[in-house]
């Protein structure tokens, strides 16, 4: 190696060779990023059915990805401390070859069924043993290849950060194409094969990068080392700021994703939208001439923070475009401001790998906070407003403020405002009611004030932080849902038990969707006594209630035997009171916290009064229900949504095959498909048809929302028309055929984008 180096020591790389180096390195980094970020939604979608399709699966997955990214960056940093050029190339190629031997992607054997608790730790372990090695190898490529590029002698080597933009372009395209092209067109098996092939191509490209490095002129290496030694090392204070600037948007990414996916669906479409924007910010800030100047983003950042304050205050979850667009647009601006600060303070090329280690460490810290620590520390989604307030501190420090004499009174004025607005929350009275009625305007005004201070007064970032924090505290103290009784959080989401004015109704909310309610007082103020009446979606005059009645009457007309019913999803326990004496009803649910809440008589009395000995089967219904004996149930009711997020694996052709196998000879499956954002009726009709079942659809608005009796969309599927009794001849039910040309959902294929489009198209 020494003789080769000395023979070319006097040579400078030719223009042709420089062009080849640029093409090969750019292609390798691009393909690596493409694979790195396409595997995230791909493999997480494979894992979703193990844990009920919970949106928290993606949050925990992001913690794994960010942690392995840190490990890969640290590995690259240590490897590049070796002066010998051959060793890093050989070691990394051997790692890549070892990783490809573990492909194609698959859930490791022995990890089929999760434990009764400790889901997050179990899930992290599953990811490690299943895809840890190939992901780790991919994670190291970006900093490692950039460090190699610095040593090739290319004219652009002194500032290789443009390659980071190339990497993030690949990541951005991978994520954006997944829900728009890959998921709708290819099955999981085909996606897996394409990804494995791409991994093989990447190894060849990286081998080419290694050859080009080893054949680089020794003088180029010496020049790089000489240039690097003249650059001062970053201070530890600067490194700490890098970590903080990377942690805040990383945590916000998980918080925003959880916020929007809880109310729509746990699916790649909604995972990759925020992550794509997150990566796009890296692309934009590391351009030599940024398309969006950093000073613009700093000006807009307080406005974006105030925008999220208003969105949190107003709600807006009923509007899909507002939920998706508003939160993500504001998140994009905040991330641009944070990442722009990182790009502005990036070090010389010598410290490149250390810089990336700091970024990845910050990303991991933010991910750990939002994905693991916060869900176990707070009973509500506190991480979103906390990170939002911290984003204000990401602004660069101001040397001076406009009108400094007047601004000296800021803290006194803010403290006075805080006392005046917060103290009433600890008491009752007209002032408290007034503040609650006008909470949106109060919180919004404070958020707007923070923006005004930042833009007009050149305000100190700590003052902006304090103003935003106060606005968020007010939203928490004066919430939209009157008389909150308690908030309970688990791996599967946040449950709120809300008491309406006067305590007339107790309402169970999961995310922003009502999942059950019970009437405690009549309109004249007298307490409700006796057996509670099922309401919300389960009223006797609604779709589910009518289906139960029709199957019961058909059963009684045939042999008079009592019904045997399976219910997937406990909710508030409402359906326990739909059972009649002598009937056998068995419930299945994945969330023990939900069952405990529904069983507590201080919240709901359905279970206490109608099924006091109820012991639901805990676990994912696809796994637990499959163990039930075949051919025993007259009726199977599937209603297992978390907020409006659907567990897709319960609405596939294979899932319907399981339901059908458990049906008695004249049994029926009832699927509740009410959803604000997704059209699911055609999905259920399609999977039923693939299993040779006929389907009837019920869509009717009760017009009794004030009584907590809601409209329901229900699909009933059975083998023959006679199996559903009077339901088949009712004018409220429509026998429905599969939609022509619409692909059936399977465990290997689903299309959330199509369901969203159909709902928007139908104007519902």
Image: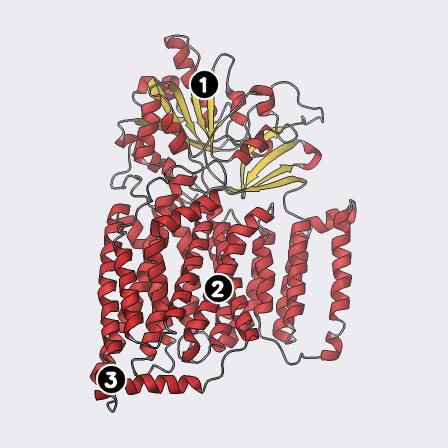
Which label number is shown at residue 549? 1
Q: Residue visible at 60% across and 45% down?
A: 379
CA separation, marks 2 and 1? Answer: 58 Å
Decide: marks 2, 3 in contact (CB < 8 A)?
A: no
Q: Circle 1 — which element? A: helix
Front position in the image: 619 or 81:
81
**If you read the primary sequence from the N terminus, does the residue marked by circle 3 or circle 1 appear first?**
3
The earlier-in-sequence mark between 2 and 3 is: 3
- Left or right: 194 as drawn, with respect to 484: left
Residue 343 left/right relative to 609: left
The x, y position of residue 742, in whole percent, is 27, 41
Rendered location of residue 427, percent (x, y): 78, 46
- Report which residue position mark 3 lands on: 5
The C terminus lies in quadrant: top left
Residue placed at 65% from the left, 47% from the top? 479
In the image, residue 208 sits, relative to residue 138, either above or below, namely: below
Question: Is residue 714 rendered to the left or right of residue 417?
Answer: left
Q: CA distance from mark 2 to mark 3?
A: 37 Å
Q: Is residue 319 above or below residue 240?
A: above
Q: Outermost residue, top direction?
A: 559
Q: How is the image coloured?
A: secondary structure
Circle 1 Cα neighbour tier, 10 Å, few/some/many (<14 / 14–19 / ≥20): some
Mark 2: secondary structure: helix
Mark 3 vs mark 1, foreground winner is 3
Q: Residue at x 26, y 51 (%)?
A: 103
Circle 2 residue: 361
Tell me the CA gap for discs 3 and 1: 86 Å
User: Are the residues tagged 3 and 1 within 8 Å (C-beta)?
Assistant: no
């Amino acid at each position: 190696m020494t003789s080769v180096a000395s023979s070319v020591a006097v040579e400078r790389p030719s223009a042709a060779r420089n062009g080849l180096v640029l093409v090969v390195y750019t292609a390798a980094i691009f393909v690596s990023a493409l694979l790195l970020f396409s595997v995230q939604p791909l493999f997480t979608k494979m894992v979703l059915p193990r844990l009920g399709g919970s949106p928290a699966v993606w949050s925990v997955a992001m913690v794994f990805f960010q942690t392995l990214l840190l490990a890969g960056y640290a590995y690259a940093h240590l490897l590049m401390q070796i002066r010998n050029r051959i060793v890093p190339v050989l070691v990394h190629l051997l790692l890549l070859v070892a990783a490809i031997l573990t492909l194609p992607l698959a859930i490791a054997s022995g990890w089929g069924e999760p434990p009764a608790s400790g889901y997050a730790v179990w899930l992290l372990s599953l990811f490690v043993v299943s895809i840890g090695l190939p992901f780790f190898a991919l994670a190291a490529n970006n900093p490692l290849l950039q460090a190699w590029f610095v040593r090739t002698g290319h004219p652009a080597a002194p500032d290789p950060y443009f390659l980071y933009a190339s990497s993030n372009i690949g990541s951005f395209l991978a994520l954006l194409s997944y829900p728009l092209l890959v998921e709708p067109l290819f099955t999981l098996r085909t996606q897996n094969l394409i990804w494995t092939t791409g991994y093989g191509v990447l190894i060849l490209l990286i081998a080419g990068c290694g050859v080009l490095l080893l054949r680089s002129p020794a003088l180029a290496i010496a020049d790089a080392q000489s240039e690097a030694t003249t650059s001062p090392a970053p201070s530890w204070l600067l490194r700490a700021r890098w970590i903080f600037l990377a942690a805040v948007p990383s945590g916000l990414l998980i918080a925003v994703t959880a916020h929007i996916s809880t109310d729509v669906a746990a699916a790649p479409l909604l995972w990759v939208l925020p992550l794509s924007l997150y990566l796009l910010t890296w692309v934009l800030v590391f351009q030599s001439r940024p398309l969006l100047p950093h000073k613009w983003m700093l000006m807009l950042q307080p406005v974006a923070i105030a925008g999220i304050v208003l969105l949190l205050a107003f709600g807006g979850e009923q509007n899909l475009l507002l939920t998706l667009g508003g939160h993500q647009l504001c998140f994009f601006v905040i991330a641009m401001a944070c990442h722009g600060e990182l790009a502005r303070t990036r070090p010389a090329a010598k410290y490149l790998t250390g810089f990336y280690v700091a970024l990845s460490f910050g990303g991991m810290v933010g991910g750990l906070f939002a994905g693991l620590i916060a869900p176990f520390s707070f009973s509500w989604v506190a991480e979103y407003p906390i990170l939002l307030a911290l984003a204000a501190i990401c602004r660069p420090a101001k040397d001076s403020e406009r009108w400094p004499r007047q601004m000296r009174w800021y803290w006194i004025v803010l403290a006075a405002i805080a006392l005046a607005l917060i103290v009433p929350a600890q008491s009752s009275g007209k002032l408290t009611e007034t503040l609650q009625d006008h909470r949106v305007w109060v919180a919004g005004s404070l958020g707007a004030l923070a923006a005004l201070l930042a833009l007009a007064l050149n305000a100190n970032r700590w003052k902006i932080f304090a103003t935003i924090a106060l606005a968020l505290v007010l939203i928490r103290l004066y919430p939209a849902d009157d008389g909150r009784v308690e908030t309970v959080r688990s791996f599967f989401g946040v449950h709120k038990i809300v008491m309406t004015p006067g305590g007339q109704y107790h309402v169970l909310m999961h995310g922003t969707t009502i999942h059950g309610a019970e009437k405690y007082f009549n309109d004249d103020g007298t307490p409700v006594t006796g057996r509670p009446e099922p309401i919300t979606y389960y009223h006797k005059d609604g779709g589910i209630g009518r289906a139960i009645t029709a199957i019961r009457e058909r059963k009684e007309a045939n042999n008079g035997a009592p019904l045997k019913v399976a219910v997937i999803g406990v909710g508030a326990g409402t359906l326990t009171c739909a059972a009649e004496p002598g009937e056998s009803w068995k419930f299945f649910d994945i969330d023990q916290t939900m069952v405990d809440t529904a069983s507590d008589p201080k919240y709901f009395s359905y279970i206490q009064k109608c099924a006091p000995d109820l012991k639901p089967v805990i676990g994912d219904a696809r796994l637990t229900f499959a163990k039930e004996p075949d051919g025993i149930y007259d009726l199977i009711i599937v209603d297992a949504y978390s907020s409006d997020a659907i567990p897709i694996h319960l609405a596939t052709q294979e899932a319907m095959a399981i339901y059908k196998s458990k049906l008695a000879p004249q049994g029926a499956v009832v699927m509740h498909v009410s959803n604000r954002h997704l059209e699911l009726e055609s999905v259920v009709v399609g999977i039923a048809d693939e299993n040779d079942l006929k389907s009837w659809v019920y869509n009717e608005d009760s017009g009794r929302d004030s009584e907590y009796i809601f409209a329901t969309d229900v699909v009933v599927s059975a083998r023959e028309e006679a199996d559903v009794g009077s339901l088949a001849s009712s004018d409220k039910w429509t026998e429905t055929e599969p939609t022509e040309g619409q692909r059936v959902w399977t465990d290997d294929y689903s299309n959330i984008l199509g369901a969203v489009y159909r709902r928007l198209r139908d104007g519902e």
